[in-house]
Image (cartoon, helix red, strand yellow):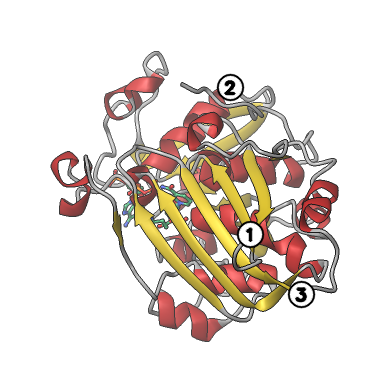
Amino acid sequence: MGIRVAVAGASGYAGGELLRLIVGHPEFDLVTATAHSQAGAPVAAVHPQLTGLDLVFGATDPAVLAEADLVFLALPHGQSATLAAALPETVKVVDLGADHRLRDADAWTRYYGGAHAGAWTYGLPELPGQRAAIAESSRVAATGCYAVATILALAPLIAAGAVSAEDVVVVAASGTSGAGRAAKVHLLGSEVMGDLSAYKVGAHQHVPEIKQATGATSLSFTPVLAPMPRGILATVTARPTGTGPDPRTVLTEAYADEPFVRVLPEGTWPHTSATLGGNSCHVQVTSDVDSGRVIVSSAIDNLGKGAAGQAVQCANLMLGLPETAGLPAYGTTP
Ligand SMILES: NC(=O)C1=CN([C@@H]2O[C@H](COP(=O)(O)OP(=O)(O)OC[C@H]3O[C@@H](n4cnc5c(N)ncnc54)[C@H](OP(=O)(O)O)[C@@H]3O)[C@@H](O)[C@H]2O)C=CC1
Ligand SMILES: CC(=O)N[C@@H](CCC(=O)OP(=O)(O)O)C(=O)O
Protein backbone atom coordinates (compact mmCIF):
# COMPACT_ATOMS: atom_id res chain seq x y z
CA MET A 1 0.00 0.00 0.00
CA GLY A 2 1.37 3.39 -0.99
CA ILE A 3 0.35 6.80 0.31
CA ARG A 4 -3.46 6.99 0.46
CA VAL A 5 -4.66 9.97 -1.55
CA ALA A 6 -8.18 11.38 -1.99
CA VAL A 7 -9.60 14.07 -4.28
CA ALA A 8 -12.65 16.18 -3.43
CA GLY A 9 -14.14 17.89 -6.47
CA ALA A 10 -12.79 15.11 -8.69
CA SER A 11 -15.49 15.52 -11.35
CA GLY A 12 -14.23 19.01 -12.29
CA TYR A 13 -11.47 19.93 -14.73
CA ALA A 14 -8.76 20.35 -12.10
CA GLY A 15 -10.03 17.22 -10.31
CA GLY A 16 -9.82 15.18 -13.51
CA GLU A 17 -6.23 16.25 -14.11
CA LEU A 18 -5.42 15.40 -10.49
CA LEU A 19 -6.82 11.90 -10.96
CA ARG A 20 -4.71 11.42 -14.10
CA LEU A 21 -1.53 12.46 -12.27
CA ILE A 22 -2.33 10.47 -9.12
CA VAL A 23 -2.93 7.16 -10.91
CA GLY A 24 0.41 7.63 -12.69
CA HIS A 25 2.28 8.56 -9.50
CA PRO A 26 4.77 5.96 -8.25
CA GLU A 27 3.91 6.40 -4.55
CA PHE A 28 0.22 7.34 -4.53
CA ASP A 29 -2.82 5.08 -4.17
CA LEU A 30 -6.05 6.80 -5.18
CA VAL A 31 -8.53 5.73 -2.47
CA THR A 32 -11.40 8.22 -2.90
CA ALA A 33 -12.68 10.58 -5.58
CA THR A 34 -15.68 12.67 -4.60
CA ALA A 35 -18.15 14.80 -6.54
CA HIS A 36 -21.21 16.89 -5.81
CA SER A 37 -24.02 16.74 -8.40
CA GLN A 38 -22.22 13.86 -10.15
CA ALA A 39 -21.74 11.65 -7.08
CA GLY A 40 -22.58 8.08 -8.00
CA ALA A 41 -21.38 8.41 -11.61
CA PRO A 42 -18.50 6.26 -12.88
CA VAL A 43 -15.32 8.33 -13.21
CA ALA A 44 -14.88 7.37 -16.86
CA ALA A 45 -18.38 8.61 -17.70
CA VAL A 46 -17.31 12.12 -16.67
CA HIS A 47 -13.63 11.94 -17.64
CA PRO A 48 -13.36 9.77 -20.80
CA GLN A 49 -9.58 10.27 -20.75
CA LEU A 50 -9.63 8.06 -17.62
CA THR A 51 -11.47 5.14 -19.25
CA GLY A 52 -10.21 1.97 -17.58
CA LEU A 53 -10.12 3.54 -14.12
CA ASP A 54 -12.68 1.42 -12.28
CA LEU A 55 -13.99 3.93 -9.74
CA VAL A 56 -17.27 5.67 -8.92
CA PHE A 57 -17.49 9.22 -7.55
CA GLY A 58 -18.50 9.23 -3.90
CA ALA A 59 -20.32 11.99 -2.05
CA THR A 60 -18.08 14.64 -0.49
CA ASP A 61 -18.09 13.19 3.03
CA PRO A 62 -15.35 14.43 5.40
CA ALA A 63 -15.41 11.15 7.35
CA VAL A 64 -14.46 9.21 4.21
CA LEU A 65 -11.87 11.76 3.10
CA ALA A 66 -10.31 11.60 6.59
CA GLU A 67 -9.25 8.00 5.90
CA ALA A 68 -6.66 9.26 3.39
CA ASP A 69 -3.12 10.40 4.23
CA LEU A 70 -3.46 13.39 1.92
CA VAL A 71 -6.54 15.11 0.47
CA PHE A 72 -6.61 17.41 -2.55
CA LEU A 73 -9.50 19.88 -2.54
CA ALA A 74 -10.57 20.98 -6.04
CA LEU A 75 -13.81 22.71 -5.10
CA PRO A 76 -15.35 26.03 -6.12
CA HIS A 77 -13.99 29.07 -4.27
CA GLY A 78 -15.56 29.35 -0.83
CA GLN A 79 -16.27 25.60 -0.46
CA SER A 80 -12.88 24.41 0.81
CA ALA A 81 -12.71 26.07 4.19
CA THR A 82 -15.66 24.24 5.81
CA LEU A 83 -14.55 20.87 4.47
CA ALA A 84 -10.93 21.41 5.49
CA ALA A 85 -11.99 22.36 9.00
CA ALA A 86 -13.74 18.99 9.31
CA LEU A 87 -10.55 17.04 8.48
CA PRO A 88 -8.16 16.05 11.31
CA GLU A 89 -4.71 17.72 11.45
CA THR A 90 -3.14 14.30 10.82
CA VAL A 91 -4.52 14.41 7.27
CA LYS A 92 -2.44 16.61 4.99
CA VAL A 93 -4.44 18.91 2.72
CA VAL A 94 -3.60 20.72 -0.51
CA ASP A 95 -6.32 23.18 -1.52
CA LEU A 96 -6.45 24.14 -5.20
CA GLY A 97 -9.05 26.81 -4.48
CA ALA A 98 -8.44 30.36 -3.33
CA ASP A 99 -9.90 30.09 0.18
CA HIS A 100 -6.56 30.05 2.00
CA ARG A 101 -4.20 31.88 -0.39
CA LEU A 102 -4.50 35.46 0.85
CA ARG A 103 -3.09 36.82 4.10
CA ASP A 104 -5.08 40.05 3.79
CA ALA A 105 -8.67 39.47 4.95
CA ASP A 106 -9.82 42.76 3.42
CA ALA A 107 -8.47 41.73 0.01
CA TRP A 108 -10.32 38.41 0.34
CA THR A 109 -13.61 40.15 1.07
CA ARG A 110 -13.08 42.68 -1.73
CA TYR A 111 -12.33 40.14 -4.45
CA TYR A 112 -14.18 36.99 -3.32
CA GLY A 113 -16.74 38.16 -0.75
CA GLY A 114 -17.74 36.50 2.51
CA ALA A 115 -15.69 35.65 5.55
CA HIS A 116 -11.95 35.07 5.25
CA ALA A 117 -10.93 31.54 6.29
CA GLY A 118 -7.31 32.46 7.10
CA ALA A 119 -4.10 31.91 5.17
CA TRP A 120 -2.24 28.62 4.75
CA THR A 121 1.32 28.11 3.48
CA TYR A 122 1.40 29.45 -0.08
CA GLY A 123 2.03 26.62 -2.52
CA LEU A 124 4.59 27.93 -4.97
CA PRO A 125 7.86 26.04 -4.31
CA GLU A 126 9.93 28.27 -6.62
CA LEU A 127 9.52 31.31 -4.34
CA PRO A 128 12.50 31.83 -1.99
CA GLY A 129 12.03 29.91 1.26
CA GLN A 130 8.72 28.43 0.16
CA ARG A 131 10.00 24.95 -0.66
CA ALA A 132 11.05 24.42 2.96
CA ALA A 133 7.86 26.00 4.30
CA ILE A 134 5.69 23.70 2.18
CA ALA A 135 7.69 20.64 3.30
CA GLU A 136 6.94 21.50 6.95
CA SER A 137 3.22 22.21 6.42
CA SER A 138 0.17 19.99 6.71
CA ARG A 139 -2.05 22.62 5.02
CA VAL A 140 -0.99 24.20 1.71
CA ALA A 141 -2.91 26.61 -0.55
CA ALA A 142 -1.86 25.99 -4.15
CA THR A 143 -1.51 29.06 -6.37
CA GLY A 144 -4.05 30.48 -8.81
CA CYS A 145 -3.52 29.68 -12.49
CA TYR A 146 -2.84 33.21 -13.82
CA ALA A 147 -0.93 33.88 -10.62
CA VAL A 148 1.60 31.07 -11.29
CA ALA A 149 2.40 32.31 -14.78
CA THR A 150 2.74 35.92 -13.61
CA ILE A 151 4.60 35.34 -10.35
CA LEU A 152 7.22 33.10 -11.95
CA ALA A 153 7.84 35.81 -14.58
CA LEU A 154 7.97 38.70 -12.13
CA ALA A 155 9.00 37.75 -8.58
CA PRO A 156 12.76 37.29 -9.14
CA LEU A 157 12.97 40.58 -11.09
CA ILE A 158 11.40 42.62 -8.28
CA ALA A 159 13.37 40.78 -5.60
CA ALA A 160 16.66 41.50 -7.41
CA GLY A 161 15.79 45.17 -7.97
CA ALA A 162 15.85 44.73 -11.75
CA VAL A 163 12.35 46.21 -12.21
CA SER A 164 10.23 48.63 -10.23
CA ALA A 165 7.48 47.15 -8.05
CA GLU A 166 5.43 50.28 -8.66
CA ASP A 167 4.53 49.88 -12.32
CA VAL A 168 3.65 46.37 -13.47
CA VAL A 169 1.25 45.65 -16.35
CA VAL A 170 0.05 42.15 -17.20
CA VAL A 171 -2.13 40.92 -20.05
CA ALA A 172 -2.76 37.18 -19.90
CA ALA A 173 -4.76 34.86 -22.12
CA SER A 174 -6.33 31.67 -20.80
CA GLY A 175 -8.01 28.66 -22.31
CA THR A 176 -11.62 28.05 -21.33
CA SER A 177 -10.94 25.20 -18.86
CA GLY A 178 -9.61 27.91 -16.53
CA ALA A 179 -13.21 28.81 -15.83
CA GLY A 180 -14.15 25.31 -14.68
CA ARG A 181 -16.62 22.82 -16.04
CA ALA A 182 -19.91 24.32 -14.87
CA ALA A 183 -22.07 25.39 -17.82
CA LYS A 184 -21.82 29.12 -18.54
CA VAL A 185 -23.16 30.85 -21.66
CA HIS A 186 -19.94 32.76 -22.38
CA LEU A 187 -18.06 29.44 -22.48
CA LEU A 188 -20.26 27.79 -25.13
CA GLY A 189 -18.27 26.75 -28.18
CA SER A 190 -20.40 29.03 -30.37
CA GLU A 191 -19.46 32.00 -28.17
CA VAL A 192 -15.75 31.22 -27.72
CA MET A 193 -14.66 29.85 -31.08
CA GLY A 194 -13.29 32.52 -33.40
CA ASP A 195 -13.35 35.10 -30.60
CA LEU A 196 -10.97 36.85 -28.21
CA SER A 197 -12.27 39.06 -25.44
CA ALA A 198 -11.06 40.64 -22.22
CA TYR A 199 -13.09 39.99 -19.06
CA LYS A 200 -13.05 40.99 -15.36
CA VAL A 201 -11.24 44.07 -16.68
CA GLY A 202 -9.67 46.15 -13.95
CA ALA A 203 -10.75 43.85 -11.12
CA HIS A 204 -9.39 40.31 -11.36
CA GLN A 205 -9.22 38.27 -8.16
CA HIS A 206 -5.62 37.18 -8.77
CA VAL A 207 -4.30 40.74 -8.36
CA PRO A 208 -3.94 40.60 -4.54
CA GLU A 209 -2.40 37.14 -4.76
CA ILE A 210 0.21 38.28 -7.29
CA LYS A 211 1.00 41.41 -5.25
CA GLN A 212 1.36 39.34 -2.08
CA ALA A 213 3.79 36.91 -3.72
CA THR A 214 5.88 39.38 -5.73
CA GLY A 215 5.89 42.56 -3.68
CA ALA A 216 4.42 44.50 -6.61
CA THR A 217 2.71 47.62 -5.25
CA SER A 218 0.86 48.69 -8.40
CA LEU A 219 -0.41 46.04 -10.79
CA SER A 220 -2.70 46.32 -13.80
CA PHE A 221 -3.96 42.86 -14.79
CA THR A 222 -6.16 42.16 -17.82
CA PRO A 223 -7.26 38.58 -18.55
CA VAL A 224 -8.32 37.48 -22.03
CA LEU A 225 -10.44 34.42 -22.82
CA ALA A 226 -8.82 32.46 -25.64
CA PRO A 227 -10.57 29.96 -27.96
CA MET A 228 -8.62 26.92 -26.79
CA PRO A 229 -9.34 24.36 -24.06
CA ARG A 230 -6.24 24.87 -21.94
CA GLY A 231 -3.07 26.93 -21.52
CA ILE A 232 -2.12 30.38 -20.23
CA LEU A 233 0.19 32.90 -21.87
CA ALA A 234 1.03 35.88 -19.64
CA THR A 235 2.76 38.98 -20.97
CA VAL A 236 4.26 40.86 -18.03
CA THR A 237 5.85 44.27 -18.51
CA ALA A 238 7.59 46.42 -15.90
CA ARG A 239 9.77 49.51 -15.76
CA PRO A 240 13.49 48.73 -15.27
CA THR A 241 15.05 50.39 -12.25
CA GLY A 242 18.12 51.25 -14.33
CA THR A 243 20.39 50.42 -11.44
CA GLY A 244 19.56 46.74 -11.02
CA PRO A 245 21.01 43.61 -12.60
CA ASP A 246 20.28 42.35 -16.10
CA PRO A 247 16.77 40.74 -16.16
CA ARG A 248 17.84 37.75 -18.26
CA THR A 249 20.68 37.00 -15.86
CA VAL A 250 18.30 37.29 -12.90
CA LEU A 251 15.75 34.86 -14.33
CA THR A 252 18.38 32.43 -15.60
CA GLU A 253 20.07 32.28 -12.20
CA ALA A 254 16.77 32.09 -10.29
CA TYR A 255 15.62 29.05 -12.24
CA ALA A 256 18.95 27.34 -12.97
CA ASP A 257 18.22 24.48 -10.55
CA GLU A 258 14.44 24.40 -10.88
CA PRO A 259 13.07 21.20 -12.40
CA PHE A 260 10.01 22.77 -14.03
CA VAL A 261 10.81 26.39 -14.97
CA ARG A 262 12.72 26.90 -18.22
CA VAL A 263 14.14 30.21 -19.41
CA LEU A 264 14.12 29.73 -23.18
CA PRO A 265 17.12 30.42 -25.41
CA GLU A 266 17.21 34.03 -26.68
CA GLY A 267 14.93 34.65 -29.64
CA THR A 268 12.50 31.81 -28.92
CA TRP A 269 9.13 32.55 -27.33
CA PRO A 270 6.91 30.49 -25.05
CA HIS A 271 4.03 28.55 -26.60
CA THR A 272 1.16 27.33 -24.45
CA SER A 273 0.98 24.15 -26.53
CA ALA A 274 4.55 23.22 -25.52
CA THR A 275 3.54 23.09 -21.85
CA LEU A 276 0.26 21.15 -22.15
CA GLY A 277 0.08 17.95 -20.15
CA GLY A 278 3.25 18.78 -18.22
CA ASN A 279 4.16 20.72 -15.10
CA SER A 280 6.45 23.16 -16.86
CA CYS A 281 6.55 26.94 -17.12
CA HIS A 282 8.38 28.42 -20.12
CA VAL A 283 9.74 31.96 -19.77
CA GLN A 284 11.37 34.47 -22.13
CA VAL A 285 12.52 38.01 -21.39
CA THR A 286 13.57 41.00 -23.46
CA SER A 287 13.62 44.77 -23.41
CA ASP A 288 11.16 46.89 -25.39
CA VAL A 289 13.21 48.90 -27.92
CA ASP A 290 10.85 51.87 -27.73
CA SER A 291 9.73 52.21 -24.11
CA GLY A 292 12.63 50.36 -22.51
CA ARG A 293 10.19 48.33 -20.43
CA VAL A 294 11.19 44.79 -19.48
CA ILE A 295 8.86 42.27 -21.17
CA VAL A 296 8.52 38.74 -19.85
CA SER A 297 6.41 36.13 -21.63
CA SER A 298 5.44 33.05 -19.68
CA ALA A 299 3.42 29.97 -20.63
CA ILE A 300 1.90 27.21 -18.54
CA ASP A 301 -0.81 24.59 -18.72
CA ASN A 302 -3.49 26.06 -16.44
CA LEU A 303 -4.48 22.54 -15.39
CA GLY A 304 -0.80 21.48 -14.99
CA LYS A 305 1.58 23.96 -13.36
CA GLY A 306 -1.49 26.18 -12.92
CA ALA A 307 -3.47 23.64 -10.87
CA ALA A 308 -3.09 19.86 -10.54
CA GLY A 309 0.64 19.62 -11.32
CA GLN A 310 1.48 22.39 -8.88
CA ALA A 311 -0.69 20.69 -6.24
CA VAL A 312 1.09 17.34 -6.71
CA GLN A 313 4.48 19.14 -6.57
CA CYS A 314 3.44 20.59 -3.19
CA ALA A 315 2.12 17.23 -1.98
CA ASN A 316 5.43 15.56 -2.88
CA LEU A 317 7.26 18.11 -0.72
CA MET A 318 4.79 17.71 2.18
CA LEU A 319 5.23 13.92 2.08
CA GLY A 320 9.03 13.97 1.85
CA LEU A 321 9.00 12.48 -1.66
CA PRO A 322 11.14 13.62 -4.59
CA GLU A 323 9.54 16.90 -5.69
CA THR A 324 9.25 15.73 -9.28
CA ALA A 325 7.64 12.33 -8.55
CA GLY A 326 4.79 11.56 -10.93
CA LEU A 327 5.10 14.90 -12.73
CA PRO A 328 5.92 15.21 -16.43
CA ALA A 329 8.46 17.98 -17.05
CA TYR A 330 7.68 18.02 -20.77
CA GLY A 331 4.52 18.85 -22.71
CA THR A 332 2.62 17.11 -25.47
CA THR A 333 2.54 19.51 -28.44
CA PRO A 334 1.08 19.43 -31.06
N1 LIG B 1 -9.57 25.22 -13.87
C1 LIG B 1 -8.37 25.72 -13.63
O1 LIG B 1 -7.58 26.02 -14.54
C2 LIG B 1 -7.92 25.95 -12.23
C3 LIG B 1 -8.76 25.72 -11.15
N2 LIG B 1 -8.30 25.96 -9.89
C4 LIG B 1 -9.19 25.81 -8.76
O2 LIG B 1 -9.58 24.46 -8.57
C5 LIG B 1 -10.91 24.43 -8.07
C6 LIG B 1 -11.74 23.59 -9.01
O3 LIG B 1 -11.76 24.21 -10.28
P1 LIG B 1 -12.32 23.50 -11.58
O4 LIG B 1 -11.93 22.08 -11.60
O5 LIG B 1 -11.92 24.37 -12.71
O6 LIG B 1 -13.89 23.63 -11.31
P2 LIG B 1 -15.08 22.73 -11.89
O7 LIG B 1 -16.28 23.58 -11.89
O8 LIG B 1 -14.66 22.10 -13.17
O9 LIG B 1 -15.25 21.58 -10.78
C7 LIG B 1 -15.77 21.85 -9.51
C8 LIG B 1 -15.82 20.57 -8.69
O10 LIG B 1 -16.37 20.87 -7.38
C9 LIG B 1 -17.54 20.08 -7.16
N3 LIG B 1 -18.49 20.89 -6.40
C10 LIG B 1 -19.25 21.93 -6.82
N4 LIG B 1 -19.97 22.44 -5.80
C11 LIG B 1 -19.66 21.70 -4.71
C12 LIG B 1 -20.09 21.71 -3.36
N5 LIG B 1 -20.98 22.60 -2.91
N6 LIG B 1 -19.55 20.80 -2.50
C13 LIG B 1 -18.68 19.87 -2.93
N7 LIG B 1 -18.24 19.81 -4.21
C14 LIG B 1 -18.71 20.71 -5.08
C15 LIG B 1 -18.04 19.71 -8.55
O11 LIG B 1 -18.83 18.54 -8.45
P3 LIG B 1 -20.01 18.16 -9.53
O12 LIG B 1 -19.44 18.42 -10.89
O13 LIG B 1 -20.23 16.71 -9.26
O14 LIG B 1 -21.18 19.03 -9.19
C16 LIG B 1 -16.72 19.50 -9.29
O15 LIG B 1 -16.19 18.24 -8.95
C17 LIG B 1 -11.40 25.88 -7.99
O16 LIG B 1 -11.23 26.37 -6.67
C18 LIG B 1 -10.49 26.58 -8.95
O17 LIG B 1 -10.33 27.93 -8.64
C19 LIG B 1 -7.02 26.35 -9.64
C20 LIG B 1 -6.16 26.59 -10.65
C21 LIG B 1 -6.56 26.45 -12.04
C1 LIG C 1 -10.77 31.56 -17.99
C2 LIG C 1 -11.20 31.88 -16.58
O1 LIG C 1 -12.33 32.27 -16.37
N1 LIG C 1 -10.30 31.70 -15.63
C3 LIG C 1 -10.59 31.94 -14.23
C4 LIG C 1 -9.35 31.48 -13.49
C5 LIG C 1 -9.36 31.70 -12.04
C6 LIG C 1 -9.91 30.57 -11.20
O2 LIG C 1 -11.09 30.44 -10.96
O3 LIG C 1 -9.10 29.65 -10.68
P1 LIG C 1 -7.92 29.87 -9.65
O4 LIG C 1 -8.06 31.16 -8.91
O5 LIG C 1 -8.02 28.77 -8.70
O6 LIG C 1 -6.74 29.78 -10.53
C7 LIG C 1 -10.86 33.43 -13.95
O7 LIG C 1 -10.32 34.30 -14.61
O8 LIG C 1 -11.57 33.71 -12.97
Q: Residues within 10 Å of mark 1 (few under 14, many from 20)?
A: few
Give me the disc on residue 242: none
Q: Mark 2 to mark 3: distance in Å? A: 45 Å
Residue 296 vertical placement versus 19 (above, below): below
Q: To which residue does mark 1 refer?
A: 289
**Side of 158 relative to 182 (left or right):** right
Disc 1 element? loop
Q: Residues within 10 Å of mark 2 (few under 14, many from 20)?
A: some
- At 74% from the left edge and 57% from the top edge, which residue is drawn? 137
Disc 2 element? loop
Q: To which residue does mark 3 refer?
A: 241
The residue lying toward the viewer, choosing from 14 and 242, is 242
Disc 3 element? loop
Nearer-N-terminus badge (2/3): 2
On whether ligand 2 comes within 8 Å of the CB at mark 1, the answer is no
Q: To which residue does mark 2 refer?
A: 24
Closer to the camera: disc 1 or disc 2? 1
Check disc 2 and give the amino acid type: Gly
- Residue 102 visible within the image: no
| Mark 2 and mark 3 residues within 8 Å of each other at the beta carbon | no
In what quadrant of the picture does the N terminus appear? top right
Residue 147 vertical placement versus 214 (above, below): above
| Mark 1 and mark 3 residues within 8 Å of each other at the beta carbon | no
Residue 254 vertical placement versus 333 (above, below): below
Check disc 1 and give the amino acid type: Val
Outermost residue toward the front in this view: 290
- At 83% from the left edge and 60% from the top edge, which residue is drawn? 129
- Residue 131 in percent (x, y) is at 79, 52
On whether ligand 2 comes within 8 Å of the CB at mark 3, the answer is no
Residue 317 vertical placement versus 154 (above, below): above
Check disc 3 and give the amino acid type: Thr
